[in-house]
Image (spheres, rainbow, N blue to C red):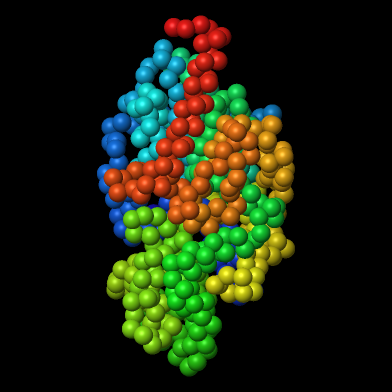
């Protein structure tokens, strides 16, 4: 194994400190942004392949359908210093299987990579492949800078050295990356007349909506799935996320909701007794002995929040947890009910890894920087407004934590300055167009999403029972009718955009 340099080791350790300090509820009751992400990667880690976890079926394509390419991407699009012209290799993947060819003016469906390795999404994003045959579309996936194989400076070690090398890691830079790759690809394939539809989920959904607003000359339209573009600068109440988590559990079972509400104080009471932590470790079969009660509470907090965020059919994780609790005999104590809920969700394993949400990964490492620079989403909760203990968002301590780790302060107002968000209906009603904001109302992040149409072409599509990014994931023969209808509605809207585009194109160049 290569020995890390002291500087890199110091940065890595400081990042770990930040991650443990601001990702979960701390002793001071502060909470940082939870994970975004198209899928729950902790479930994937425990239960096998991504595609099988999401849809229960093999994806409707194979690895042979994908061709990988690299684009010499500019490091800094916004300055003209000599170092700005440095390039790195940005990965993109193409599926030519359904493409009608250069002379067909067939559309290009573009998936905008999020905060993960692009490989993780190729097997999960079924919306493009399901609908490409109908339009004879070319499918393009572009990896986000600083993730996967699209890392500047030659290696992750160098790229994540400090704020000087991480300073080019931003959403604005990523959007220009996407524009350059798309424009270059269309030129190389002689498809200048092909309309582009960008698709993204979660953070990638935010990027998709912003891309259409910033680069309407590149993208005809955007499908922004589960994109909480209003969870910035206090546009959305900070308890929005956890209020929906609470609502999901309460709708599943009043007893389950009540059990979780009482669980936190019960854990603290037991932990304060002699050998209390040992008892809790044994009771919950933790893989490592608990050192403090917050370790168990953080794990359960994240488990319940994640279950709500990815509460998808056919199993519905929230129902799995509540069913486990509710099927215990009458009179079962609070802790035993909580353990039963854990077994119902994660199965009866030899032990439960309370660190599962803490392990370093490129997504955690990258998102840590992004939330400490520009993606400041003030998620918190007050007293008695959710089933969780109070943990209000504290911007001052948030800033201090980031300064201690990276030597720079977050810019909490930058996203709304760059992309807007305040008074969004008035601003975008006449300015924006051709964006679908899709949400599932069981997704806690839908609290920061656009849930009402802003204009005839800025359309909100949502389902009562939907969860995070469910509409763009692989389809299944067992999909419920409401999910099928949501996807059909979205593709009908996109079809309308394309029809108008081809009519305009015919008026300009004449029929073929």
Q: How many marks?
A: 0
**Residue 324 visible in the picture:** yes
Name the spot of residue 454 as percent of width and height, x first. Answer: 63, 39
Query: Which image quarter: residue 474?
Result: top left
Q: Residue drawn at (66%, 51%), measured in percent from left and top?
A: 232
Is 125 on the left-hand or right-hand side of 347? right
Name the spot of residue 75 as percent of width and height, x first. Answer: 59, 34
Query: Which image quarter: residue 69?
Result: top left
Query: Which image quarter: residue 93?
Result: top left
Comparing 504 with 372, the one in front is: 504
Q: Residue drawn at (58%, 47%), measured in percent from left and top?
A: 451
Is 106 on the left-hand or right-hand side of 228? left
Comparing 73 with 193, the one in front is: 193
Quarter of the image for the N terminus: give it.
bottom left
Q: Is residue 57 above or below residue 62?
A: below
Q: Is residue 329 above or below residue 100?
A: below
Q: Residue drawn at (53%, 20%), measured in percent from left and top?
A: 501
Q: Residue drawn at (40%, 71%), measured in percent from left and top?
A: 322
What residue occupies the far bottom of the structure in this picture? 274
Name the spot of residue 207 as percent of width and height, x first. Answer: 56, 40
**Residue 12 visible in the picture:** no
Name the spot of residue 82 as percent of width and height, x first. Answer: 66, 30
Quarter of the image for the C terminus: give it.
top left
């Amino acid at each position: 194994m290569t020995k890390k340099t002291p500087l890199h080791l110091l940065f890595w350790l400081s990042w770990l400190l930040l991650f443990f300090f601001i990702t979960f509820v701390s002793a001071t009751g502060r909470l940082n942004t939870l994970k975004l992400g198209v899928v729950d990667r902790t479930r994937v880690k425990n239960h096998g392949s991504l595609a099988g976890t999401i849809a229960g079926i093999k994806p409707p394509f194979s690895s042979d359908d994908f061709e990988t390419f690299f684009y010499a991407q500019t490091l800094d699009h916004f300055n003209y210093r000599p170092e700005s012209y440095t390039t790195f290799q940005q990965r993109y993947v193409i599926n030519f299987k359904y493409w009608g060819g250069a002379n067909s003016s067939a559309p290009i469906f573009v998936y905008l990579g999020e905060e993960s390795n692009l490989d993780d999404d190729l097997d999960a994003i079924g919306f493009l492949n399901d609908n490409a045959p109908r339009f004879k579309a070319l499918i393009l996936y572009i990896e986000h800078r600083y993730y996967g194989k699209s890392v500047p400076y030659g290696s992750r070690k160098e790229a994540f050295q400090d704020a000087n090398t991480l300073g080019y890691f931003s959403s604005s830079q990523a959007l220009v990356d996407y524009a350059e790759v798309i424009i270059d690809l269309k030129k190389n394939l002689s498809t200048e007349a092909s309309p582009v539809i960008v698709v993204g989920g979660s953070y990638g959904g935010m990027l998709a909506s912003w891309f259409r607003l910033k680069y309407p000359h590149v993208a005809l339209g955007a499908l922004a799935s589960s994109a909480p573009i209003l969870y910035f600068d206090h546009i959305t109440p900070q308890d929005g996320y956890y209020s929906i988590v609470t609502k999901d559990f309460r709708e599943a079972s009043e007893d389950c909701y009540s059990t979780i509400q009482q669980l936190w104080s019960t854990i603290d009471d037991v932990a304060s007794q002699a050998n209390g932590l040992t008892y809790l470790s044994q009771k919950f079969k933790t893989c490592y002995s608990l050192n403090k009660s917050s370790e168990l509470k953080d794990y359960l907090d994240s488990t319940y929040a994640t279950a709500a965020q990815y509460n998808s059919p056919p199993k519905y994780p929230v129902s799995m947890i509540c069913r486990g609790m509710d099927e215990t005999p009458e009179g079962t104590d609070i802790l035993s009910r909580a353990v039963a809920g854990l077994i119902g969700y994660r199965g009866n394993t030899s032990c439960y890894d309370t660190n599962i949400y803490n392990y370093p990964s490129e997504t955690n490492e990258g998102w840590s920087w992004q939330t400490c620079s520009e993606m400041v989403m003030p998620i918190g909760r007050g007293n008695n407004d959710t089933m969780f203990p109070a943990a209000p968002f504290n911007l001052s301590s948030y800033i201090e934590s980031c300064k201690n780790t990276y030597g720079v302060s977050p810019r909490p107002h930058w996203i709304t300055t760059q992309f807007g968000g305040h008074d969004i209906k008035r601003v975008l009603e006449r300015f924006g167009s051709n964006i679908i904001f899709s949400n599932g109302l069981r997704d806690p992040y839908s609290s920061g999403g656009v849930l009402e149409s802003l204009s005839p072409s800025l359309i909100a599509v949502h389902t009562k029972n939907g969860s995070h990014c469910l509409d763009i994931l692989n389809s299944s023969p067992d999909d419920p009718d409401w999910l099928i209808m949501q996807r059909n509605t979205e593709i009908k809207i996109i079809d309308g955009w394309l029809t108008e585009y081809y009519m305009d194109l015919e008026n300009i160049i004449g029929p073929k």
